[in-house]
Image (cartoon, grey):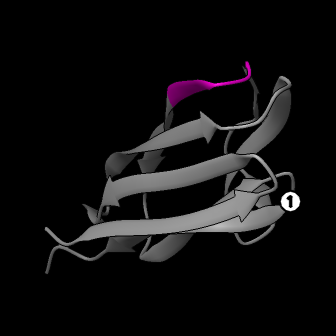
């Protein structure tokens, strides 16, 4: 398995997505880590999506000077594709879905 790790940073909030490629007919599991180095709480909306289809939506609040971790999951993905993870509509990472054969 190849690990996918991409980062995006907004003023005080660093975000990292970690996930391995997954085979078809397997559920998505991606860990998103937030580190808020600023002086105020920040709230973001996470969405894993395939093309324009949103698989899930989660709002996460990260207090000042803290780190939070969330695991995004979905049902099994039947076709070869790429799951894109967005934070406030900005791409922050992706997870390839590969064919087994």
Q: Is residue 67 highlighted in magenta?
A: yes
Residue ranking furthest to the bottom = 101
Magenta segment: 63-69
Q: Which residue is mark 1?
A: 89
Pick the front one: 68 or 55 = 68
State the image coordinates of residue 78 (x, y, percent, origin top left).
43, 60
From the image, which quarter does the C terminus lie in?
A: bottom left
Q: Quadrant of residue 24?
A: bottom left
Q: State the residue lying farthest toward the front.
A: 39
Q: x and y percent of residue 27 in the render?
A: 37, 43
Residue sitting at 62 percent across and 51 percent down? 14
- Expressed as whole percent of the image width and height from the top left, the position of residue 70 reads 52, 29
One can see residue 84 in this view: no
- Depth check: 10 or 57 in front? 10
> Residue 45 lies in magenta, yes or no?
no
Res. 3 in view: yes
Q: Residue at x 64, y 25 (%)?
A: 65
- Give the image location of residue 21, x and y in percent: 28, 66
Instruction: Decide if residue 33 is on the left or right side of residue 92.
Output: left
Query: Is residue 68 depicted above or below 23 in this figure?
Result: above
Q: 37 left or right of 94?
A: right
């Amino acid at each position: 398995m190849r690990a996918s790790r991409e980062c995006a940073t907004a003023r005080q909030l660093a975000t990292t997505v970690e996930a391995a490629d997954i085979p078809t007919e397997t559920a998505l599991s991606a860990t998103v880590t937030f580190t808020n180095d600023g002086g105020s709480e920040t709230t973001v909306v996470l969405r894993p999506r395939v093309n324009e289809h949103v698989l899930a939506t989660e709002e996460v609040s990260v207090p000042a000077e803290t780190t939070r971790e969330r695991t995004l999951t979905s049902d099994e993905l039947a076709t070869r594709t790429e799951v894109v993870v967005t934070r406030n509509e900005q791409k922050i990472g992706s997870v390839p879905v590969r064919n087994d054969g």
